[in-house]
Image (spheres, rainbow, N blue to C red):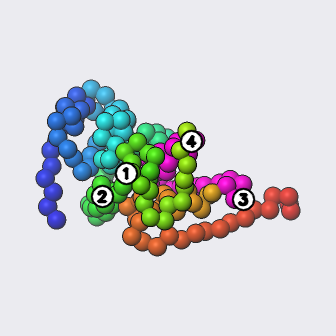
Amino acid sequence: MSLATESAADLTSARRLLSTEKFSLCLTDMRLPDGDGIELVKYIQTECKQMPVAMITAHGSTETAIKALKAGAFDFVSKPVDLQKLRDLINAALRLTHKKPLQGSSDAASTAPSGTSITGQSAAIKQLREQIYKLARSQAPIYISGESGCGKELAARAIHQQSARSDAPFHKIWWRANCSAT
């Protein structure tokens, strides 16, 4: 597969390019001459919500990775980058560009995808859909906890349905801790 690319030397140039052209994916470094990659991730989350962005840096740490993922980055990769891992990241990110958000998220279609059973129009449900949309666009592992019957599996299925892995089977892992038994 061949991809057309553009490059920007700094944060200002990247914002200018993003405001004039449409892209399927953004790869950014953490350290830019006039700012940092987290600023670009946040900009993309407000101005180009459908576009996945991955952070690639030689200055990686767990805290930086968490910060990037919380800001909305699709993935975080440390240098030197393994070319096969980069290809896999790009392929997964490009699959995301064809996903439709759940009803109620900011860029939503008029109806929810089939099989989605999170319904309602309250502010809390709309916020939940927005969180699901954001989580589905990340490669980060997700842990969902809560009381029995609160909808953890519904949320997990909705995340899977919108993720780059939605064509793969959904596997439910059920674990129950009995803390009072110790």
Image spot of residue 76 (x, y percent) = 39, 49
Q: Which residue is mark 2?
A: 98
What distance separates the C-alpha of mark 2 from that of mark 3? 33 Å
Q: Which residue is mark 3?
A: 148
Residue, x 57% and y 60% (percent of image)? 154
Q: Secondary structure at mark 2?
A: loop
Of marks 1 and 3, which one's residue comes earlier in the chain? 1
Q: Of the residues tagged 1 and 2, which is closer to the observer?
A: 1
Q: Residues within 10 Å of mark 1 (few under 14, many from 20)?
A: few
What distance separates the C-alpha of mark 3 from that of mark 4? 22 Å
Q: Residues within 10 Å of mark 4 (few under 14, many from 20)?
A: few
104 shown above or below 85: above
Task: Locate residue 123: give its quadrant.
Answer: top right
On the question of residue 41 being in view, the answer is: no
Q: Of the residues tagged 1 and 3, which is closer to the observer?
A: 1
Task: Locate residue 111: give its quadrant.
Answer: bottom left
Q: Which residues are magenta?
A: 124-150
Q: Secondary structure at mark 4?
A: loop
What distance separates the C-alpha of mark 1 from that of mark 4? 17 Å
Image spot of residue 104 (x, y percent) = 46, 46
The answer to whether residue 96 is left or right of residue 10 is right
Of marks 3 and 4, which one's residue comes earlier in the chain? 4
Q: Which residue is mark 4?
A: 122
Q: Secondary structure at mark 3?
A: loop
Q: Secondary structure at mark 1?
A: loop
* Nearer to the camera, 46 or 151: 151
What distance separates the C-alpha of mark 2 from that of mark 4? 27 Å
